[in-house]
Image (cartoon, rainbow, N blue to C red):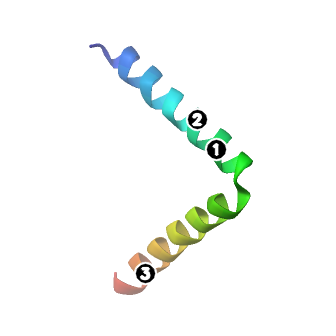
Amino acid sequence: MTVTDIYEAMNGKADRFFEWAQANPKFGLLFAAVLLAFWLTGLLLE
């Protein structure tokens, strides 16, 4: 397995995730909110 194969696999998974997030906007926004909360928690605890 080469670096290119790994990149293509990850890119494909990201594409499928973003397509799913567009089809299900409530869950996509929930995921974005969780990421934002995680980031803000990291800033506060730093």
Mark 3 or 1, which is nearer the eye? 1
Q: Which residue is mark 1?
A: 20
Residue 23 vertical placement versus 44 (above, below) = above
Q: Residue at x 63, y 61 (%)?
A: 27
Within 10 Å of disc 2 (Cα), the crowding (few <14, some 14-19, many 20+) is few
Q: Quadrant of residue 33?
A: bottom right
- State the CA–CA distance, disc 1 to disc 2: 6 Å
Q: Residue at x 65, y 49 (%)?
A: 21
Label 3 amino acid?
A: Thr
**Front: mark 2 or 3:** 2
Give above or below for 23 relative to 27.
above
Q: Nearer the viewer, residue 6 or 31?
A: 31
C-beta proximity under 8 Å, tags 1 and 2: yes
- The foreground one among 11 and 46 is 11
Residue 29: % across, % down: 66, 64
| Quarter of the figure that contains the N terminus | top left
Q: Earlier in the sequence, mark 2 or mark 3?
A: 2
The image quarter containing residue 5 is: top left
Residue wearing tag 3: 41
Residue beneath label 2, please?
16
Say what secondary structure mark 2 lies in.
helix
Which corner quadrant of the image does residue 19 belong to? top right
Residue shown at 69%/53% (left/top)?
Answer: 24
31 left or right of 26? left
